[in-house]
């Protein structure tokens, strides 16, 4: 594959993926796998990625009937390819998705009336990272200058790369990019066709481990350690769903909260549920992926202080300002335009042990 200079326009950032990197991946129709609900509010739900440990608590909550108990019928819980999770809900194709919170600030600048609303945060720290072989000696952002990096167009870490580089006083155009299918990213790094790849730490590293790589041979450079103090994925709702079904959102958040609380208590049981939805996955790999997310993105110091779901508005506003500065956006989103805490469950339900 021919390497090209990194160039990402705001139009490309905002564009949805008409055909996701999932190709022919089957949609998850919960009624065919789990007991049919008698819920009144229909919800079409988009996951963040292909079904894996990072989104298994949602699948578990569906199987356990947590959504149904809140009067919600999940009509679909479909895999995604990353950034398209936001596009799906912003276009009202889906009612709810598990998407990147900070990206909503960038979306607001061009589409303030369409920007989805985040109602429940899961990842207190963005998992976006640069992953490389240790032998490539890439330990700080400037080590990437002149290097070739692989990244899927639908990858949020790829989309945030210009912000990451500018936050470190570097020119994104100084890096060559190979745009690669999401499913081929890790194998491209394994074949040393690129010096590094963009991706979420839990996704790329656990995939590399399943391909035989050892942790001591891999370098993970988190954006969060180099200038991007960003939140990660949150539950977001479409403006249409907010208008038509606002009363259902507190119950939605309670169901999600119960699923993630159970995941922290018994990740094996949650992974068992995941494999019922996709028997081709490997239990040990996906349980480890779930545990990685819990340990590194959920059970942070802030997570333990604020509990599941909540955020620090001042911290989010700083992140929005960083995005706006990197892209010279005409509008800087106020926190309340993309986030609301009014639907959160009680602090007791959200407490992280």
Image (tube, rainbow, N blue to C red):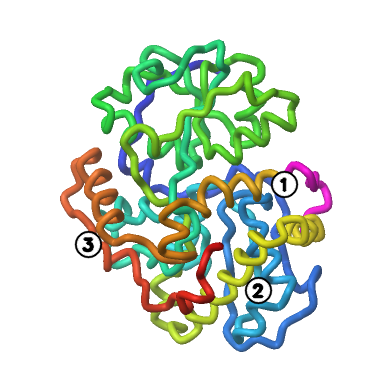
Please indicate, yes or no, whether residue 207 appears anywhere in the rendered image: yes
Q: Mark 2 points at which residue?
A: 75
Please give the range of residues in magenta. Answer: 277-286
Q: Residues within 10 Å of mark 3 (few under 14, many from 20)?
A: some
Q: Residues within 10 Å of mark 1 (few under 14, many from 20)?
A: many
* First reached walking from the N terminus: tag 1 or tag 3: 1
Separation of residues labelled 2 and 3 (CA atoms): 33 Å
- Residue placed most toward the observer, 269 or 204: 269
User: Looking at the image, is 94 positioned above or below residue 219?
Assistant: below
Specify whether 140 is left or right of 261: left
Residue 175 image point, x, y percent? 38, 19
Q: Quadrant of the C terminus?
A: bottom right
Specify whether 262 is left or right of 323: right
User: Looking at the image, is 93 positioned above or below residue 12?
Assistant: below
| Number of the label disc, if any, that sits on residue 35 | none
Specify whether 346 is left or right of 294: left
Separation of residues labelled 1 and 3 (CA atoms): 37 Å
| Number of the label disc, if any, that sits on residue 334 | 3
Secondary structure of residue under mark 2: strand
Q: Name the residue under label 1.
A: 286
Residue 285 image point, x, y percent? 74, 42
Q: In which quarter of the image is the N terminus?
A: top right
Secondary structure of residue under mark 3: loop
Q: Which of marks 2 and 3 is in front?
A: 3
Residue depicted at 71% across the width and 56% down the height: 267
């Amino acid at each position: 594959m021919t390497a090209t200079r990194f160039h990402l326009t705001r139009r490309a950032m905002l564009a949805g993926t008409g055909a996701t990197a999932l190709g022919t991946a089957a949609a998850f129709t919960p009624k065919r796998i789990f007991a049919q609900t008698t819920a009144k509010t229909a919800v079409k739900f988009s996951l963040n990625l292909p079904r894996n440990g990072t989104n298994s608590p949602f699948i578990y909550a569906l199987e356990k009937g947590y959504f149904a108990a809140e009067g919600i019928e999940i009509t679909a819980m479909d895999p995604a390819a990353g950034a398209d999770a936001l596009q799906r809900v912003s276009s009202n194709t889906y009612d709810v998705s598990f998407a990147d919170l900070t990206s909503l600030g960038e979306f607001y600048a061009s589409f303030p009336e369409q920007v989805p609303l985040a109602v429940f945060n899961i990842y207190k720290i963005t998992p976006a990272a640069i992953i490389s072989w240790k032998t490539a000696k890439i330990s700080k952002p400037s080590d990437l200058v002149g290097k070739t990096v692989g990244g899927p167009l639908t990858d949020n870490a790829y989309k945030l790369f210009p912000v990451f580089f500018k936050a470190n006083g570097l020119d994104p155009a100084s890096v060559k990019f190979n745009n690669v299918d999401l499913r081929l990213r890790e194998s491209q790094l394994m074949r040393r066709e690129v010096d590094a790849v963009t991706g979420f730490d839990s996704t790329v590293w656990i995939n590399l481990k399943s391909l035989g790589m050892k942790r001591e041979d891999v370098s993970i450079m988190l954006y969060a350690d180099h200038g991007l103090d960003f939140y990660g994925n949150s539950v977001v709702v479409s403006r249409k769903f907010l208008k038509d079904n606002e009363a259902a959102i507190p119950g939605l958040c309670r169901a999600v909260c119960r699923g993630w609380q159970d995941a922290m208590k018994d990740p094996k049981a949650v992974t068992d549920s995941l494999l019922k939805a996709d028997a081709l996955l490997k239990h040990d790999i996906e349980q480890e992926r779930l545990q990685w997310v819990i340990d590194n993105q959920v059970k942070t110091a802030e997570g333990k202080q604020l509990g599941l779901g909540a955020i620090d508005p001042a911290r989010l506003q700083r992140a929005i300002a960083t995005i706006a500065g990197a892209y010279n956006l005409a509008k800087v989103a106020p926190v309340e335009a993309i986030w609301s805490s009014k639907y959160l469950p009680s602090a007791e339900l959200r407490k992280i042990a």
